[in-house]
Image: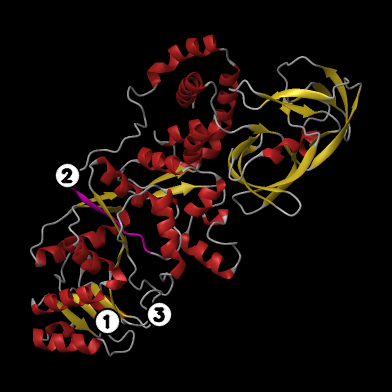
Amino acid sequence: MQNLSEYILAHALKNSLEFGKTSLEIILPKLFQHGLEKKDIKEILPKIREIVEIVNKLSEKQKQEEFRKYESLLPEKPVQSGELPELPKVSKKPVFRMAPFPSGALHIGNARTLLLNAMYSEKYKGKILLVMDDTIGSSEKPPIKEAYELIKDSAKWLKVKYGKNIIYKSDRLKIYYDYAEQLIKKDKAYVCHCSQEELRNNRAKGIECSCRQFPQKIQLLRWKEMFKMKEGEGVLRIKTDMLHPNPAFRDRVLFKISDREHPRVKKKYRVWPTLEMSWAVDDHLLGVTHVIRGSDLLMETDMEKFIWDIFNWKHPEVIHHGLVNLETSEGKISKSKAGKEVKSGVYTGWDDPRTWSLQSLRRRGILPDSLRQFVKELGMTKQNITVPIESLYAINRKAVDRKANRYSFVSQPVELKIKNAPDITEVQVPIHPDKKETKKVSVEKIFISEDDCQKFKGKEVRLLHLYNIKISSGNEAEFTSKENKEIPKINWVSSHVSAKILLPSGIWQKGIAESSIKNIKKDEVLQLERFAFVKYDKRGKDDYEFWFTHR
């Protein structure tokens, strides 16, 4: 713990010297990058908070002196360069592709692969294709109509320039059928009527299916008959070595039958290709030179390579990155779950903060450049990692902090009765710590939060930008001094309007905000002091509505 404490201290001092202060949200991501595991978070959080509090109280000279003692503990190179590593075998005009499956709005995990492809295209001045990977999917995860526009909207927000034409796989079925017939003629594919249980037994024993033995001409007839079969009666399989070390690689499905209606082509097609079949064909025909995808698609990549070799096609460079699990206080991010809740009406729409979609992040005040930087800093690591959402928040905080003016907000307001209060009718309050401008705030009745009333009962506190008081029982307090000394500072509101903030959990935090908040503009990001950064959403019937951005 001692070595870790010193390492935390070194990072906290460095960050505080660079930006004037530090915070838990900034320090924690750096520790994850150096081996801190999820199971250790609960134990280490109190220590980080303690160190952050100590560092922020130091003078500039003290910080410099202390940092010299611990500087050697930090790596010589920055932990996060913010630059993408070089790719192998890059030609003068590389071609990348983004391949979202339109089963719902993109969330951060989906956006990572999309952005990696887009940013590498920008890095090498290449070409980026937007291909809607809209094969039929599964009954649990089908393509949906609104997802197409949601994906295009996200790409535009992320400043991805993919050209005028979008490619839809649902428009390319006849192309896939042609290559299916070529595989059959090459004696590399066959129509199979076996049940899943039969196939499983054959794979386990390493024996060929009886359906595989028919000659090509019969297989072509069976292929044509497949278009008239009932769903589940037949599939087209590729011929592989039934003694392949990986049983899952043995005679995988290339085409299946589905009677579900497709959002674009309705019921025009019944026989649909699998991901590996469609991409094996399209990566070749579309001239893709580099495929960047998640490590969950290793098997699909192996199958694509197998098909490319059958046709003697040149292989694109395939780069797999590890999967990122984002740690949020609201739990795991799931597009499938979000889709169900949007459809059922539990969520208000795809921009509901609980979906964690790009639309919801935009509405909360996360900037597209922050998301781009977040993806850059994650890089192309091959390991699956867990990253706290605070890593993204820390990047966005740097981007919005200097522009976001400060306002006062109090939840569960309680009117304070202050004995011997100075006769002050207004006070000049800075609109931002780094700006010279101030605003006039009238001092009439004083409201603080009920939580602060309880938390600081019997203690001296400072009403931020005003004066010091000692809170006694209930909502009573007594003026102590005007000296700005080192005691807890709490928010207060006098002249006010009703306000509420939508939290990532979907719960509204209600309260009152200073009346000058009426002058803010639509979509403005501001900081409610000692509460959070928020984005102004709209004027409601009874109050001003904001969306929580981050602390």
- Measured as percent of width and height from the top left, residue 199 is found at 25, 78
Q: How is the image coloured?
A: secondary structure
> Which one is earlier in the sequence, the residue at label 2 or at label 1?
2
- Nearer the observer, disc 1 or disc 3? 3
> Which one is earlier in the sequence, the residue at label 2 or at label 3?
2
Which residue matches tag 3? Answer: 261
Which residue matches tag 2? Answer: 90
The amino acid type, in three-letter code, at marker 1 is Glu
Quadrant in the picture for residue 254: bottom left
Which residue matches tag 1? Answer: 198
Residue at image point 17% right, 54% down: 316
Viewer-nearest residue: 198 or 167:
167
Compared to residue 296, the image places residue 407 above or below, namely: above
Residue at image point 74% right, 49% down: 543
* Span highlighted in magenta in the image: 88-101
The amino acid type, in three-letter code, at marker 3 is Glu
- Decide whether residue 493 is among the magenta residues: no
What separation in Å lies between label 2 and label 1 (alpha carbons)?
A: 45 Å
Find out whether the residues at labels 2 and 3 contact each other: C-beta distance under 8 Å. no
- Measured as percent of width and height from the top left, residue 98 is found at 31, 56
Quarter of the figure with the C terminus: top right
**Disc ID at residue 371:** none
> Which one is earlier in the sequence, the residue at label 1 or at label 3?
1
Q: Main secondary structure of the magenta part?
A: loop
